Amino acid sequence: MRQWRALHGAEREVYFAQEHPPGRLALSDVTVADDLRVEIDGAVFEHRLCQFALAHSGWRHPAVFTGGECFLALSTGLQAALWRLGGVPEEHRTDTCPPRSTTWPRPRN
């Protein structure tokens, strides 16, 4: 190791540049926000946050949902963001919803 450092110098940080051309990629994510313990008039507000973002510009569109399924929150949030944006990107990515949709909020025991 000493010999290698003597020949090549100190360790250098590895950097992989990412290119995000305009109009190419959008990303969405749905987050269950129950752990935030938001209260309205003393009652806990159980909700999900759906966020849509463009990779190139960072333009974002958030949406709040109460109840329903993960897919419903994602699809409704995506549709609202695309209408607001006034167009569609070439590609949209999300890793939010499981293969089978689950109803939310989950019943409490």
Image (spheres, grey):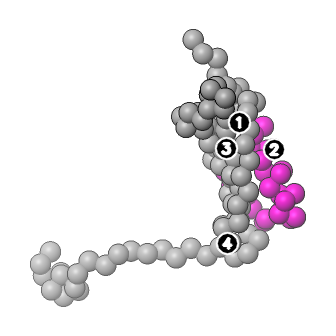
Task: Tell me which numbered mark, 3 or 1, is placed earlier along the sequence.
Answer: 3
Residue situated in front as seen by the camera: 33 or 9 = 33
Distance from Cα at disc 3 to Cα at disc 2: 11 Å
In this rendering, does residue 99 appear at all? no
Kindly identify the amino acid type of the residue bearing the numbered disc 2. Answer: Thr
What percent of the width, then of the height, locates residue 39?
A: 62, 32
State the predominant SS element of the stretch in magenta.
helix
Residue situated in front as seen by the camera: 21 or 39 = 39
* Residue behind mark 2: 76
Q: Quadrant of residue 60?
A: bottom right
In this rendering, does residue 64 appear at all? yes
Task: Tell me which numbered mark, 4 or 1, is placed earlier along the sequence.
Answer: 4
Outermost residue toward the left in this view? 2
Say which residue appears at 12% left-offset and 82% top-offset. Answer: 3
SS type, badge 2? helix
Task: Tell me which numbered mark, 3 or 2, is placed earlier along the sequence.
Answer: 3
> Is 15 left, or right, of 27 in this rendering?
left
Please check the rendered image and state whether residue 88 is part of the magenta-colored stretch, yes or no. yes
What percent of the width, then of the height, locates residue 47?
A: 67, 35
> Which segment is the magenta one?
69-94
Say which residue appears at 55% left-offset and 37% top-offset. Answer: 36
* Residue behind mark 3: 49
Q: Quadrant of residue 101?
A: top right
SS type, badge 3? strand
SS type, badge 4? loop
Kindly identify the amino acid type of the residue bearing the numbered disc 4. Answer: His
Quadrant that contains the N terminus: bottom left
* Residue behind mark 4: 56
What percent of the width, then of the height, locates residue 4?
A: 18, 81
* Residue behind mark 1: 70
